[in-house]
Amino acid sequence: MSDLPSRAKVVVVGAGIVGNSVVKHLAALGWTDIVLVDKGPLPNPGGSTGHASNFLFPVDHNKEMAMLTFDSMAQYEEMGVSTTPGGIEVARTEARMEEFRRRMTSAKTWGIDAELLTPAEVKDKVPFLDESVILGGFFTPSVSVVDSLQAGTLMRQYAIDKGALTVSPVTEVMDITVADGKVTGVETDKGYMETDHVVIACGVWSPRIAKMAGATIPLTPAVHQMIDVGPIDILQETNNEIAYPIVRDMDTFCYERQSGGSMEVGSYAHRPIFHHPDTIPSIEESRLSPTELPLTQDDFDPQLEQAIELMPMLGDAEMKYGINGLLSLTPDAMPLVGESVEVENLWSAAAIWIKEGPSTGKTIAEWMTHGYPELDPHASDVARFYTYQRTEEHILDRCAEHFNKTYGIVHPREQWESQRDYRISSFHKRTEALGAVYFEAGGWERPHWYQSNEALLEKYQDQLPAAREHEWDYRWWSPIQNAEHLALRESVAMIDLTAFAIFDFKGAGVVDYLNYMTVNQVDQPVGSWIYTPLLTEQGGFRSDLTVLRMGDNHYRVVTGGFDGGRDAYWFNKWLPADGSVTFEDKTSALCTVGVWGPNARKLVEKVTNDDVSNEGFPYGDVRQYTIGSIPVTMARISYVGELGWEITANMEHGLRLWDLLWEAGQEFDVTPVGAGVYGTSGRLEKGYRLMGAELESEYNPVEAGLNRPRVKRQDFIGKAAYLKAREEEPAAHMCTLTVENHTSTSGVARHMMGGNEPILTLDGERILDSHGRVSRVTSAGTGPSVGKYLLLAYLPPEYAVEGTDLQVMYQNELFPVKVARVGAQPLFDPDDSRMEQ
Amino acid sequence: MRILTCVKRVPSPGAKIVVTADGQAVDTNMLGFAVSPHEECAAEEAIQLIEQHGGSSTVMTLGPAEAEEQLRTIMSVGVDEAVLLTTDGSDWDPMATARALATAIGELEAAGGPFDLIFFGNESADSGGYQVGVRIARALGRPIVSGIKDVDVTDGEVTARRDTPTGSEVYKLPLPAVLAIKEGINLPRYPTLKGRLGAKKREVAVMEASGEPGGQVMLTLLAPPSQETPTEILGDGASAAPAVVDVLERIGVL
């Protein structure tokens, strides 16, 4: 432990599993002059790592989580701090057994060994369990338990041995200095350090430290109760820290894990109990540690009963230790990783659990070194949250809602109940009156389908696919979506698109700036738009959006509501410092409605005197027109592949704009259509990819089928990698597959969700490309106009051949699929004649 | 046998106690509460004696409604009955505490018969008055010895031992008697899960404490200055061994 240096390249605050991982990986990537501080002592400074249960269950439905856990497990294994007792999740309900089938499917996708067990088989492995209480189990032999404190010590030592790291424990950060929007130094109770980068890895204290710099890390400290009971003979006899598999009693939200001769029983079943980062006790004020607070017995009592039910021997065991343990929760239960949106070179490494600690440390180190990590971090990216989502109330409400779902069964399309109606579009009054069922998109209440369209079910009954039979597939969905789809393609629809994030860029330097950000050439005629990916330095997808040229030095970027936060951050990061380009977030100033369908032109003609003929307003153009008295920007573009426009106006005109279009559309039976069509069936039939689904940083435009014949001569982020990818044979191709038979072995028709279901060979084997990436379903949905259920998935060249028969696994059953299209050519209206008429 | 143990709800020892800004109360924000350690051992002793001789045990406390938590803790390790003497929530001084408890004991004995033994903690972990047990014994007209580290009951009398600087003193008292117990007399058991759940289901008798908080008025709470123990790091790993040997020789262990 040395004296605090006066200068560092990077100061990492927090020496829990995350801080230790960050310093290790920074050192491995060649960083020097790293300083690690923690207000507590080492090896256990008293944060969540110190009392963590330390087990890793690798199967996750979320791809990012699964990848992070996988990598962390490997790192722990390599450090020699891992034991593998295996883990069994037990079910007390039929719904849970069904969820296990879903877990088997995810296990298959990620290549994790897993097995469904009968109660008797569970008892074989866990003899002290009362098998009459359960219906079955989901067994993962690779579940491991790690010594996270030792791992931390080894990781610090690695960096110290490399001469890269100075460690200063018992050093409290008092302030972070910032100048010109950039980190300049860290003030501690042992002195001041000038530094270029700061990484906040303080777990539950992170928001407090971030605030010192003027940044936000949206998490809340939350309680998770655990007790230790013992000694218990059968556990003591194993003479081992952990010999029996860890049991997760999923339906009671509890777990039981052996800890030497005792059993640790943990619970996520109690009421959400939150604390504020500012009122966490200091080390002196804590009997055990600041994150081991006194157990509130009453909250745990129901779980005592349930634990005894499952493992009767626990009844007579002594409760030696019990805590309200503190851990970090975020509004959407994913970590907070990446550069803060408020302060340059201030990095967030927070809300990360033991099971993704080492890999997140690696992610952050790669991000800081190469500009983007190897594993796509978009779901953990701290930039994803909008301002209102960073408020205390939002954080607490959402965390209260999801805390008890930690072991819950969460439907992929499930919508939040709390914190709704915070972003309301200008059209809301009308869409509400039409019975819109709203799903949340970037916080916006966006119509997903309209109940008022129920009559269409009868109108289109001969064209609609067979009904969905299984309750799970039917949840958060309606057959009305398919009827809306048909109505749109038959006549004309109006779609509320206010959830778009819209940014205006102006200034003398705007062309050069945007050309540096994008793949495709932005220097197009005024009044035209381009679709373009944005890449990472490594040539993978960073963003996917539209750029409209509004004027010589005025561009408008339109991106999805889910990506607005991350994209705003990215654009701002690269904005030239000389002021030659200005950035204006126009999202809240504008509203957008899409009008599409064969009768779209006929509708719009009625409300504008401006030229909307094909000659006067060709596909690919943008115009500043007038509808009624409303100045509008009309872009001839379509994510559903039909003739029509995205019509944008100032938000105050929205209601009037809707009414004008609606009235004009009555003649053509205009249908209000929701995102169920716009984001799924409509775009799937056209093979349009979605950022965050098909488009991730692990894939490049060639693989996604989005490469153009030529590459612009200007330099842009990721150009070198992109050129190289164009030279090579792609390791995978984005394909559209059709489901050939929906009937499961139980005779029920099933419909895949696009939740990473694995595509398998006819022998039932996983398909991996030469980079080791697995073929999985990234999007799925009905294609009512093509009469097939559609899946999007990447396939390596040997399988990416139209007509190839393969299988998809869904809920642990196999279904035949066929490759319908390799690459981007649409299944529906392949030459885009409908769109470009 | 009938044994009564009187316990007090105190802030969990082991951490720095934070006093509110105005010095009038303990900051309970993150504080846990426990049974004062001497009393925990007294309750364990009572349980062991009942296991040995048969009979029943009772635990009583004078305190706020929240003190029910401590009674349930003691019940969960095996004490049969619990009585909560509720106060207005303020801290009662030793004389008032003793008066109220003595009155309640009188009522309990009138209803259920005399307690062969009444146990107190030697002193409470928070205020350390050392008096309540003595005052109650006096009020009840029973003998008391304090600082007890060993208890043995035979035929109508109790043998109690306590440490002295040079050895120990052994006392024989006729029953009924009162003892002030010292931590270290035994290792209290932890509650089992069943014990905890069983205790939850049983009733705690609630009586209102008789009398007033007492003559002593709290002026202010002061946290004593923290004592820094000077620490010398002898070295790191195996190379520190010679320095360790030096120290052991210096202090006469070797």
Image: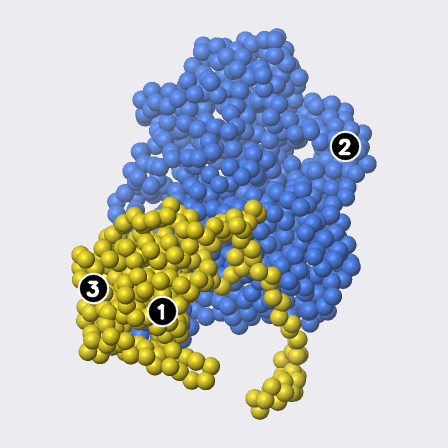
The one of A118 and A743 positioned closer to us in this rendering = A118
Bin the neighbour count of mark 2 within 10 Å (Cα to Cα): few under 14, some 14-19, many 20 and up. Answer: many
Q: CB atoms at circles 2 and 3 under 8 Å apart?
A: no
Q: Report, in whole angstroms, how far the alpha carbon at label 1 lies from the one at label 3.
A: 18 Å
Q: Residue at x 40, y 63 (%)?
A: B131
Which residue type does callout 1 highlight?
Ala
Which residue is tagged 3?
B114
Question: What's the chain of the residue with tag 1?
Answer: B
Residue A468 vs A230, above or below: the answer is above
The one of A794 and A259 positioned closer to us in this rendering = A259
- Quadrant containing the N terminus of chain A is bottom right
Q: Residue at x 46, y 31 (%)?
A: A420
Which residue is tagged 2?
A581
Q: Report, in whole angstroms, how far the alpha carbon at label 2 lies from the one at label 3.
A: 91 Å
Give the secondary structure at mark 3. loop
Chain the render paints blue: A
Is residue B134 visible to us here? Answer: yes
Q: Residue at x 61, y 40 (%)?
A: A566
Residue B61 left/right relative to A337: left
Which residue type does callout 3 highlight?
Pro
Is residue A694 visible to us here? Answer: no
